[in-house]
Amino acid sequence: MVDAVVTQAAIEMSVEAVQASQIGMKALAAAIAIAGTGFASAWAELSIGSAAVGAVAENKDLFGSVLVLTIIPETIVIFGLVVGLLLIL
Amino acid sequence: MSAIVGSAPYIYVCTRFRVRRMKLIPQEEYLRMLQMSLPEIIRLIQETEYKREIDELSHSFHGIDLIEVALSWNLAKTYQKVLAIMPEGLREMTESYLRRWDIQNVLSILRGKAQGLPPGKIKEVLIPAGELNRDYLDKIITCAEPEKVLESLKRWRLFPVLARELPRAAESGSFSSLENELYKQFYHDILEETGAGIKGGKEFLEFLRLEIDIRNLQTLFRLRVNGAKGEVVTFFIPGGTFTVEELVRLHEVSSPDAFFDSLTAQLKSRELVSLLGRFRQKNGLAPGTLHEIESALTLMQYSRLEMMARFHPFSIWPILAYIERKKQEITNLRAITRGKQAGLPMEQIRNYLVM
């Protein structure tokens, strides 16, 4: 009888541990997704931003076009954010 | 991380020069200018980016002289601005490349002095884009004798060559040998500096070799067309893909067909082979075609520069492409204005344009 109660308690504990671990893993995956895409966006924007500033310094009329080009890599981090939210929610 | 972030200044500067390159006068504009009268051309130039220099100099110069000096000033200012925004590494390479203007300026002063021109007239043709700045050059212009000029250039890095060759040049009255020796030393120094393993040096070295080859080929054609005999080894610049011995051997080939065959066999560039083929089919190496060949070689150099600038967008290539194209713009504008002033026919002026 005592053995059965102990086994039941152990099973419940391990289920809780697994559930907690799953939540932790999801959070970690979401963090990796957001951090990875964040770095990717930053890297892309470094090049595009430098080129954009250079182009605008010579020709102010290019501001509109280069602004759009600079914003495009932001979509990468938005994808990361969406994946992170899907994982957590 | 620093390697990634470190590329940002290169990207910034190279993009600026790509945009500047787009702002240079296009081919259609030159063709339009050829149809215009001289006052119309001058008015058109005044409305472009040369306006500021023209306004600054309009008190001291007039007419075509004003345009000529304004173009030189603009070129010098442009090159100084190029250096001002250059990141470390690229700046050193560009600075060393622009030192070639020192040779041109010193030779202009010496030639002007030898011909007894007044300092004001010599000043008009100077382009202080190299190491010797405007004030320094102004000081040299005021020296009355070539010996005094030599003395005031003691700090110049090419002074030993100048000191060695100037007495001979003054004696013979010809500065061509001095010019050759100065350029040889310039290319020797710049190749040595570039070979010292600086970042981006490989691309720069490739460009320098291309430039030396183009200069040597132009010299080779000039020598052949003019039928130069005797010791020609001193005319060629070492350091290109062709050795001086190969160039001398090519010069010594007597038959025009054999000359074209041996030259084509040694060429690695397909563009050059097709260019030579065109001239061979046309009329060989007649004196009239010399200028055409030289222009075609220069144009080929530019197209290669631009191709390399596309392959290596964040290197020294886009900057060199801009520097060379800007220089050519000034040369073209001068050719058009001077040609119009001399009353040359449109076709003849067009032949002098590289576009």
Image (cartoon, grey):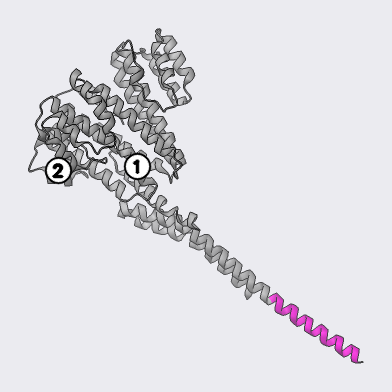
Secondary structure, mark 1, is helix
What residue did someone put label 2 on?
A: B54
Q: Residue furthest right?
A: A1
Secondary structure, mark 2, is helix
- Seen at 29% across and 37% down, the residue is B157
Task: Say which chain tag 2 marks.
Answer: B
Q: Residue furthest bottom?
A: A1
Q: Is residue B56 visible?
A: yes
Residue B17 lies left or right of residue B340; in this view the side is right
- The answer to whether residue A20 is magenta is yes
- Seen at 22% across and 23% down, the residue is B175
- Magenta residue span: A1-22
Disc 2 marks a residue whose amino acid type is Ile
What residue did someone put label 1 on?
A: B94
Please provide percent x and percent y for residue A62. Answer: 34, 54
Figure quadrant of residue B154: top left
Residue A70 lies left or right of residue B222; in this view the side is right
- Determine crowd level at label 1: few under 14, some 14-19, many 20+ residues with C-alpha closer than 10 A: many
- Seen at 21% across and 20% down, the residue is B174
- Determine crowd level at label 2: few under 14, some 14-19, many 20+ residues with C-alpha closer than 10 A: many
- The answer to whether residue B187 is magenta is no
Number of the front mark, 2 or 1: 1
Please provide percent x and percent y for residue B72. Answer: 20, 38
Disc 1 marks a residue whose amino acid type is Thr
Residue B31 lies left or right of residue B260; in this view the side is left
Figure quadrant of residue B177: top left
